[in-house]
Image: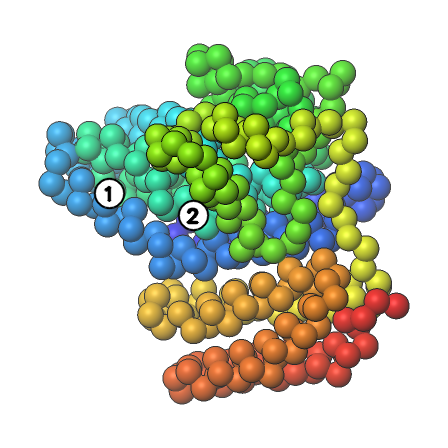
């Protein structure tokens, strides 16, 4: 049973409820462009995961089957007091490993390159929770290997891992204030707002997934202060709505430093040094401007109302395509969903450009509509051709509108 897939409808429902509360309270915590970008990154992460998560599952399964120290039986995790205690131990152990995965994800450059995607949003709402990386499969599995080595059953660990991730959804909100003593024990909205801040006092704080006790124990806890309101985002802004570039941005500037430094020790070592560290020769030739939060402005390109309507319409099509792909994957596996995912990813790419109001966005959109989608339909087999053709007909209804809406009024 895929708990995260079952939770998705509730995620979307709560997101809509928060959006309604935001409108009623006029708190302004939602911007459509930022929310669409966050959800696009989440969709890219989910659909690319159809092909990448098998890596970590295979490694975990191999370690458990070949090297487990103890023979912990799945049957021990029953409804008895002892079984429930084992579930709790597994959940706490996973949260402990998550803390170190998350902490090193901020403190080591190569791990930050993957995790930074989640922090690039300059708003903070439930859509931010769904903004996930597509490259964490490269290294994050390493932090949980000790649990499989101990001998916790694979399905138990995957279940508590899903629960850990599901829990973290609700803490991505500004609609919930401090929660008293719970703020001292659990990761709460107040605690996690601190984690998403770029303010100096809040940097690299509050890494816990469910329990904030790890942060208190290892000296990384910081309480939210009314005197220093949180400024969300990252010190080097993404400054676009492209979910693919969101996943590549940090890798790109690490590659830049690696190419331009003279010493091979630095070319290799910078990937594993503290986040923000740069070789001295590169820092001297290409200095970075210090961050000034007093001058901070959110990335917010202006679209005409007609452009915004077109983007929203296309994003609804993206959502339908995502559900369609999830159904194919569940029934037929990764091979069957490859072409539909390629179509979806092309859609996400052009949607990002449309959302920015780029002058060349219309040309890319027309290429997608008239070339990419028809080629995708040809590549698909008969079993999905009808549904895919329906998608094409829906998109095609926008073609004439696009000539009007993709230009600024």
Image coords of residue 228 (percent x, y): 73, 19
In this picture, residue 68 sits left or right of residue 10: left
Give me the residue at 47% from left, 69% from top.
342
Whether residue 244 is situated above or below residue 157 in the rendered picture: below
- Residue drawn at (33%, 67%) of the image: 333
Q: CA distance from mark 2 to mark 1?
A: 18 Å
Q: State whether residue 284 is above or below residue 140.
A: above
Find disc 1 in the rendering and name its residue: 60
Relative side of 26 to 34, left or right? right
Instruction: Looking at the picture, tell me which residue is in the foreground, 296 or 44.
Output: 296
Q: Residues within 10 Å of mark 2 (few under 14, many from 20)?
A: some
Residue at the location (82% across, 44% down)? 24
User: Residue 75 location, x and y as percent?
Assistant: 20, 39
Q: How many marks?
A: 2
Q: In terms of sequence position, does the residue under pointer 2 or pointer 1 come before the other? A: 1
Bin the neighbour count of mark 1 within 10 Å (Cα to Cα): few under 14, some 14-19, many 20 and up.
many
- With 393 as the anchor, is 110 left or right in this view? left
Numbered circle sitting on residue 135: 2
- Name the residue at the right extreme: 409
Between 268 and 382, the residue placed more toward the observer is 268
Residue, x 43% and y 58% (percent of image)?
48
């Amino acid at each position: 049973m895929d708990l995260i897939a079952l939770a998705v409808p509730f995620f979307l429902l709560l997101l809509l409820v928060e959006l309604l509360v935001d409108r009623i309270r006029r708190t302004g915590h939602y911007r459509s462009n930022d929310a669409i970008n966050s959800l696009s990154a989440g969709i890219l992460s989910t659909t690319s995961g159809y092909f990448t998560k098998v890596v970590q599952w295979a490694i975990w399964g191999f370690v458990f089957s070949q090297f487990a120290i103890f023979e912990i039986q799945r049957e021990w995790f029953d409804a008895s007091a002892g079984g429930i205690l084992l579930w709790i131990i597994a959940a706490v152990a996973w949260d402990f490993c998550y803390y170190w995965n998350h902490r090193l994800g901020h403190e080591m450059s190569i791990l930050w390159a993957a995790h930074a995607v989640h922090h690039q949003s300059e708003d903070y709402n439930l859509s931010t929770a769904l903004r996930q990386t597509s490259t964490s499969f490269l290294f994050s599995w390493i932090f949980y290997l000790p649990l499989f080595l101990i001998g916790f059953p694979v399905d138990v660990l995957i279940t508590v891992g899903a629960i850990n991730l599901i829990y973290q959804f609700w803490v991505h909100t500004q609609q919930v204030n401090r929660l008293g003593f719970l703020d001292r024990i659990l990761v709460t909205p107040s605690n996690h707002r601190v984690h998403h801040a770029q303010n100096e006092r809040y940097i690299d704080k509050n890494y816990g997934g469910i329990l904030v006790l790890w942060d208190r124990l290892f000296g990384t806890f910081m309480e939210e202060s009314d005197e220093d309101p949180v400024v969300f985002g990252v010190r080097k802004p993404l400054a676009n709505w492209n979910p693919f570039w969101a996943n590549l941005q940090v890798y790109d500037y690490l590659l830049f430093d690696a190419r331009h430094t003279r010493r091979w020790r630095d070319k290799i070592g910078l990937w594993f040094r503290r986040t923000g560290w740069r070789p001295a020769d590169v820092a001297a030739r290409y200095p970075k401007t210090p961050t000034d939060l007093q001058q901070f402005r959110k990335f917010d390109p202006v679209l005409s109302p007609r452009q915004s309507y077109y983007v929203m319409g296309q994003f609804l099509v993206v959502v339908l395509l995502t559900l369609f792909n999830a159904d194919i994957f569940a029934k037929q596996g990764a091979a069957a969903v490859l072409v539909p995912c390629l179509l979806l990813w092309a859609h996400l790419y052009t949607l990002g450009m449309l959302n920015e109001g780029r002058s060349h966005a219309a040309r890319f959109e027309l290429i997608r509509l008239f070339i990419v989608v028809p080629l995708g339909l040809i590549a698909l087999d008969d079993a999905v051709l009808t549904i895919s053709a329906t998608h094409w007909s829906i998109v095609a209804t926008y073609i004439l509108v696009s000539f009007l809406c993709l230009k600024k009024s």
